[in-house]
Image: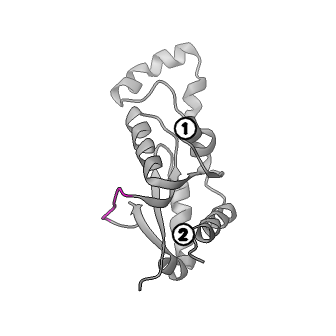
Amino acid sequence: MTPKKLRVGWFTLTCCEDSTIIFTELLNTRWQVWKEKIEFIHAKILQNTNRWEPMDVAFVEGAVSTREQEEKLKKIRSLATRLVSIGSCACIGLPSSQRNRFDDPTKEEIKILLERFKQAPTVKFLRQVVTVDDEVNGCPMNEKPFLDCIDKYLKEFNII
């Protein structure tokens, strides 16, 4: 019988993807342990074949800046038992949401770009769109809270 693994997804919205870099760097020292305990259902940074199916934990990096991303986030939430905001953009919206605070003349100046690139009127952080179970803040994310979060869910889902 194959041992149970934590079914994980890693997703990126609007951000610089610095937390994704930290995540992949962590694999340098943790891959041998994690490959026995974690099944990556969806992680474009790691694999070519990604599945949209139920998962135990979805880690989502980045802010929501388009209607398409908002729908994607809702779909991720519907598939995930737990959803974790990763990094400052996902947790508090910044720095991605700086344009929300622009004065009216500046907003008018960038309006054509927002329309061209199908950007929403404002940028949102994840809790403004879906229920979030945990947050790992930082730009990039702080490693220790992320590792603690992984350990928490390995225990919660009876993997360790």
> Can residue 145 be seen at all in this image of the molecule?
yes
Query: In the visual, does 40 lie left or right of 137?
Result: left
- The residue shown at (54%, 69%) is 25
The amino acid beneath tag 1 is Ser
The numbered disc on residue 114 is none
Indicate yes or no whether the magenta region holds residue 157: no
Q: Position of residue 98 (x, y in %)?
A: 58, 31
- Above or below residue 46? Residue 10 is above
Which element is circle 1 on? helix
The amino acid beneath tag 2 is Glu
Per the picture, the main secondary structure of the magenta-coloured stretch is: loop
- Above or below residue 50? Residue 5 is below
Q: Where is residue 29 in the image (x, y as percent from the top left)?
A: 57, 78
Query: In the visual, does 142 lie left or right of 106?
Result: right
Please give the range of residues in magenta: 48-53
Which element is circle 2 on? helix
- The residue shown at (55%, 38%) is 96
- Above or below residue 48? Residue 134 is above
Mark with earlier residue (2, 1) = 2
Q: Which of 106 and 132 is in front in this view?
A: 132
Number of marks in the rendered image: 2
The numbered disc on residue 96 is 1
Whether pointer 2 and pointer 1 mark residues with C-beta atoms closer than 8 Å, the reply is no
The quarter of the image holding the C terminus is bottom right
Indicate yes or no whether the magenta region holds residue 49: yes
The numbered disc on residue 25 is 2
Q: How crowded is mark 1: few (under 14 residues within 10 Å), some or many (20 or more)?
A: many
- Above or below residue 75? Residue 140 is below
